[in-house]
Image: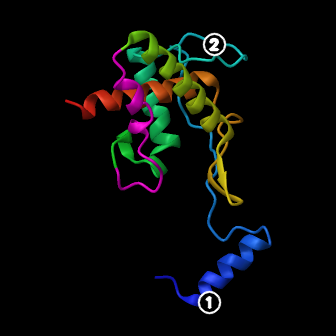
Amino acid sequence: MMNRPIRYLILAALIAGKSVIAEEVANRPAVDFSSLPKLGPTWLATNPYRGNPEAIRVGQLTYGQTCARCHGAEASTNAAPAPDLRKLDAFCRRIASEELKAACMRDNDAYFSKTVRQGKTIVGVVHMPAWEPVLPQELIWAVQSFIESRVEVSRR
């Protein structure tokens, strides 16, 4: 349990708009993605690389350099400080109707894209930085493709 003076210090910092927690910073990964089809500057509504083996490979490299420190190596741990990303589309995977499943995956793609691009700030603390200034959509969709491939591995 946190002692009282530290709690008061954190509360005072939050009220003053100051973070006492080291915020995450988005750093550009050193990943060659020239093997992926170019997507252009306009963000797509759905992941065009879903199931693409090359995108999964590029996504794994990108994930390792950008996401693993918070979400766990190989996107396969529950011990990481951030959510288990393999669970993002868990509800969609249970839907029997292909039409409804496709609609669910479109919604999931929109949520994933928005969250990664804009990041997550809660009570003034950056929990996940905005990646849009650092990652082109090719790498963001490749990361999602990699995460979805980890779901398949975890079910074996």
| Residue depth check, mark 1 versus mark 2: number of the one nearer the observer | 1
- Measured from the top left, where is residue 153 in percent x and y? 26, 30
Residues at marks 1 and 2 touching, judged by CB atoms closer than 8 Å: no
Residue 8 located left or right of residue 70 = right
At label 1, the amino acid type is Pro
Name above or below for residue 148 compared with residue 68: above
In the displayed structure image, the side of residue 118 where residue 54 appears, left or right: left
Number of marks:
2
The residue beneath circle 2 is 39
Residue 95 sits in which quadrant? top left
Instruction: Name the residue that disc number 1 marks.
Output: 5
Establish if 72 lies above or below 40.
Answer: below
Measured as percent of width and height from the top left, residue 46 is found at: 57, 17
Above or below residue 61? Residue 35 is above
Q: What element carries label 1?
A: helix
Viewer-proximal residue, 108 or 39?
A: 108
Specify start and end residues of the magenta stretch as a single range: 78-96
Q: Does the magenta stretch include residue 81?
A: yes
How far apart marks 1 and 2 lie (CA) works out to: 51 Å
Residue 82 counted in the magenta span: yes
Q: Position of residue 103 (x, y in %)?
A: 51, 17
Tell me which residue sits at (64%, 16%) in the image: 44
Left or right of 85 in this view: 136: right
Residue 138 lies, with reference to residue 13, above or below; the image says above
- Please, what is the dominant secondary structure of the magenta stretch? loop
Q: Where is residue 47 in the image (x, y as percent from the top left)?
A: 53, 18
Name the N-terminal-most of marks 1 and 2. Answer: 1
In what quadrant of the picture does the C terminus appear?
Answer: top left
